[in-house]
Amino acid sequence: MLEFKDVQTFYGSIQALKGISLTVEKGEIVTLIGANGAGKTTLLMTMSGITPASIGTITYKGEDITKMRTDMIVRKGIAHSPEGRRIFSKMTVFENLQMGAMTNDPARFDENLDYVFELFPRLKEREWQLGGTLSGGEQQMLAMGRSLMSNPEFLLLDEPSLGLAPLVIRDIFRAIKQINEEHGVTVLLVEQNANHALKLAHRGYVLVTGNIVLSGTGQELLTNPEVQAAYLEGGH
Amino acid sequence: MSDTITNLPPKPEFNLQAIAKEMAITFVVGLGLMIPMVLLRANDVNGKLVIERHWQELFFALVLLVVGRLGLILLDKHKALPALIIGVVMAIAGYSIHFPTELLEVFTLAAGVILIIRAVLFLWREYKGITANDRENAKKRREKLLENSTGYISAIVIIIAGLLPFLSDILQLLLPDFLGGDSSFIANMSGRYVVDTAILILTYVLLAWGLNIVVGYAGLLDLGFVAFYAVGSYSFAILARDFNLGFWTALPLAGAFSMLSGLVLGFPVLKLRGDYFAIVTLGFGEIVRLLLLNLYELTGGPDGINGIPRPGIGNIVFSKRAKEEGTQTFTEFFSTNFWEITYSSNHRVIFLYYIVFILCMLVAIFTIRIRQQPLGRAWEALRENEVAAASLGINRTNIKLAAFAISATWGGFAGAFFASRQGFISPESYTFIESAIILAIVVMGGMGNLMGIALAAAILIGLPELFRDLEEYRMATFGFGLVLIMIWRPTGLISFRDPTVLLFGKKKKKADEEKLAEGAGS
């Protein structure tokens, strides 16, 4: 469904991605793990066209989307829930969700809204509250719900567990599983919380300073001694 | 308000030594500041510059400062009664004793009155047992009330503004004996001076509402807004001069030229953010002003453009005599069709007032509508978080360009109106200070809130007019107003954001109900 071929991205003269090749098949949850600054977030931003790649190609459903504008990529059915939640804090929860539906057919709005509220009942309770007054976990739910409002087939999630309490993390991961299994959404998940992410994911890639150094199924990576030493020690 | 007053229990310690120390500091700092400001003053005596020493003034000013400070310290320490006495003594002294300068008398009186008010408020709160918490809650209730009643307030303000030129006639008709027959106040209410000032205020309201789209909604700090104002004025004037276009043809064209200039500026700055963006717009404003100064053939350079036609309706002109064939004066037109009136130059002023009033209403309706559309919401999303907005598929380029174009168009309308009203324009009217004033109005008003911005325009443009008697201190009142508003309401006069739920889905009504319930609950 998605293929990266030797993708390189630069911030000015600094190279953040040094030739990434990976694939994601339909219906999979694929996770990217790696330390801070490994290029995980850049990879997602490159894919959604916010920081386009300089070299290499990204193909989605057989179509080259490397140089495509973000809004066109979103219209292709790829939704990106960016790092640090980035909700619109002065807008209500409802308005935030509306923003996610900007590229979508308004006729599907109510249906999608019900879907998001079913996934995150907490958001329904907070529907008319300002985004900025939500708790961290609720903000994460809102960020995910907002990207789901565009009815995506492919969801990019950037560190959904960042700074959240263990109980809330469990809820978020349960929701990711539900999105994938019940609604058939393919997920590319970036995580620092490698333990949780690898248990959930079908496959995973390990990113070190802009390169992919390891790949395999979630279970393989979980038991890989190198991965255990670098990302799982004390990561429970 | 100092923090210590708001927390009644626990009482702060009363420590004489600390007070003495603080007063000593006040004395030293005050002395340091006053030596150059009060004591030593250069004066021109027979063509020679002499330094005069005002020992007496220094002494009085220092006493005033230290005693006033003592009063404030006592208030902070919850000794309201002695503070009250100090306040009364200062007020009486300022009122009755002859000080070396009048300014000192005014200062002493004002300081005394402020101390009295604060002390009395403190004593009253203590007597009623009002705690900081109560005050906080009361404040929240007031905010909520304001939030829920802006609709009504706006309606009242619009009605009054719409009737302003005839307000005194209406009031005199309704209440003939108001103010015991002495109705000079009412008679002046719709006087030429008031209507002229109102026209000026509304011009700034128009400008500020235009800038608000870029600054308040899209969150881009534009320091060169005056450029669009200038483009509007000059394209209006040039179209009228060289192509003989009338007001109603040239006005939309001037708006279109401004829109074009907005797009021209928009393209190169799209990638820039924050401070860098502000600097480039600042540069753009200066470029336009310098072009106006130097394109002598087109703009007349520093001489400006003269004889810009006044607006009329069809073949009706607002002057004493119809100069051109086929036109008639408003007086003739009105007298033949309605009832007999005599010529008055006020008719033209009132006509101008209604033009700018209607322009304002159009802009307001457009702005309120567009906030509920995807475009308006996309601006706000961009302001709140650019990356998130982009990741949701909002086309940043188009959205920013649209903000620029629309904002520039409103600026252009204001510019065209200004040119037509003045009849003369020159680059001097389009300096950076204008951009700064318009920006100040937007920020003071509470970015994004039309009502707040209109209020800020009325205060910031109207107050200096009101204090015209103060002459050189006039601009000081402007500055003083800015500082006071920023202390009193740091996020602007009216700064809450009304949720706009209309984008799609029929949830507006529900949102309103929730809001009402919330308002009643608190």
Image (cartoon, coloured by chain):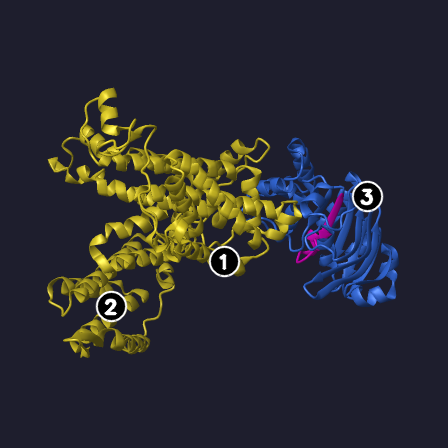
Chain colours: A blue, B yellow
Residue B278 location (% of width, % of height):
50, 58
Q: Seen in the image, is A124 located left or right of residue B99?
A: right
Q: Residues within 10 Å of mark 1 (few under 14, many from 20)?
A: some
Q: What is the quadrant of residue A40 in the picture?
A: bottom right
The amino acid type of the residue labelled 1 equals Ala
Q: Is residue B218 left or right of residue A160?
A: left
Taking the view exactly as shown, the residue that stands out farthest to the front is B297
SS for dot 1: helix
Range drawn in magenta:
A154-169
The Cα–Cα distance between marks 2 and 1, rounded to whole angstroms, is 42 Å
Percent across and percent down for residue B51 are 20, 79
Q: Is residue A157 magenta?
A: yes
Q: Which mark is residue A61?
A: 3
Q: Nearer the viewer, residue B124 or B393?
A: B393
Which label is found at residue B68? 2
Q: Please tell me if label 3 and label 1 are on a single chain.
A: no
Name the subunit of mark 2: B
Residue type (three-letter) at the residue carrying disc 3: Lys
Q: In the drawing, what numbered circle is on residue B278? A: 1
